[in-house]
Image (tube, rainbow, N blue to C red):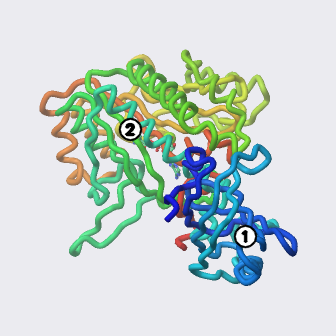
Amino acid sequence: MPEAATVSSIHLHVGQEVALSGWIYNLRGSGKVAFVLLRDGTGLVQCVASVDRLGPETFSRIRRLGQESSIEVTGTVQADPRATGGYEVRLTGVDVVQEALGYPITKKEHGPAFLFDHRHLWLRSRRQQAILRVRAAAVRALRGYLDDHDYLLLDSPILTPNACEGTSTLFGTDYYGRTAWLTQSGQLYQEAGAMAFRKTYCFGPTFRAEKSDTRRHLTEFWMVEPEIAWADLDDVMDAAEDFLVEVVARVVAEARPHLEILERDISVLERVQKPFPRVSYDEACRRLADRGIPMEPEDDFGAPQETALSDLYDRPVMVHRYPAAVKAFYMKRDPVASSRALCVDVLAPEGYGEIIGGGQREDDADALLARIREHGLPESAFGWYLDLRRYGSCPHGGWGLGIERFVAWLCGIRHIREAAPFPRTLDRLEP
Ligand code: 4AD
Ligand code: MG
């Protein structure tokens, strides 16, 4: 029996006969020779079927197989610089496991709605695989960074009694007769964690009932949220900057072949080096005004403002001290300008916009209670959170990075829904 191999390890088997299992990615050929591009989940390899080696019956069966038919094959591995991946397998035997007919995703152009309706199949295509491998590399990199830098993994709950990021984007669910919210952010629990362990993080799904269908918004997305005790806004900006520089470097080192499949300009990612420019919201508004970008005074930035700002720099830019009125209730006010919050957004280059939001938290119990009331939040749900200010409060802060926005930027893809295996948006719950 030939040794079982995978496409990713095919280079170890040159000159040997191996057994492979997979699916037909593409098939072309003539009366005597057929070229089967075999996909086995680890990569693509060209397999050559010839009537001489396989006999007329097997050969003609192969010739008729549809895209994505599943097969088990044996064959000899040859180095061939002209073939995809640099190797070729001369088939000695083929077992058809299932014959697929009329696979819906073909070489012709399909619209996004069709492709997302067939997301369960679209995952098999080369580009989608490259994106999702970059995502996996990004998750490995950010976990690796945080684990290596003494942040303790502390999972935040998904079902919560609290609204963290405003009451207008909550998904509720019945919880034995009362309403639980699907978490918008694990931050509040990380604050409890940071008071216990100094530096913690969570990485998990978060939910927002976003009413607008944009290329930057999902209703379910994964967020990593580090939190640090004894840290002010500058410390948070330093930590987030170090995190982003190191995580991007790790992804580039590990996922370069996948970024190349996506034809990503990797030099953009290599420029993610310290120091990031840091501008206040007020300074950013002046720069926007200089460039003639319209903007409502005291308003949050939207996509046009973020794009115009990030275009001024060759690396991510940190915008700090937004108007407190447009930001979340838990943010600490700037002691030198009380209308400003001690917060920071990191805007990615090339118009990708905000990928990180964070800042310093209100650490005074009375001020925090006043904010909870101003925002019309139910006090009873925040008793535990106020305890953190009653028992050993200290300056602290952290940030959240949405993995899909991060991956979309890493990959250079326009819409973040391709960065999620099964995206959830305003108009999509299937598949
Ligand atoms: O700026 P946001 O709302 O901040 C928070 O949730 C804080 N509690 C984080 C913290 O300080 N621990 O969201 C943080 C990030 C955004 O910068 C963006 O990357 C992502 O989460 N994000 C979304 N990604 C996809 N779809 C959405 N609807 C998103 N909303 C936020
Ligand atoms: Mg934000």
Q: Who comes first in sequence, dot 1 or dot 2? A: 1
Percent x, y of residue 280: 55, 22
Residue visible at 65% across and 35% down in the picture: 306
Percent x, y of residue 257: 63, 40
Q: Is residue 27 left or right of residue 227?
A: right
Q: Compute the Cα span from label 1 to label 2.
A: 49 Å
Q: How many marks?
A: 2
Observer able to see residue 254: yes
Tell me the residue that label 1 is attached to: 53
Q: Residue furthest right?
A: 30
In the image, residue 415 above or below residue 249: below
Residue visible at 73% across and 50% down in the picture: 84
- Foreground residue among 169 and 74: 74
Q: Residue furthest left?
A: 391
**Secondary-structure class at tag 2:** helix
Instruction: Specify the amino acid type for callout 1.
Output: Arg
Instruction: Specify the amino acid type for callout 2.
Output: Arg
Where, quadrant-wise, is the C terminus in this rendering?
bottom right
Mark 1 vs 2: CB contact within 8 A: no
- Foreground residue among 51 and 161: 51
Residue visible at 52% across and 61% down in the picture: 2
Residue 52 falls in image quadrant: bottom right
In the image, residue 396 above or below residue 1: above
Residue 296 falls in image quadrant: top right
**Secondary-structure class at tag 1:** helix
Please state which of the two labelled residues, at mark 1 or mark 2, is closer to the viewer. Answer: 1
In the image, residue 270 above or below residue 84: above
Percent x, y of residue 281: 57, 26
Tell me the residue that label 2 is attached to: 143
Residue 37 falls in image quadrant: bottom right
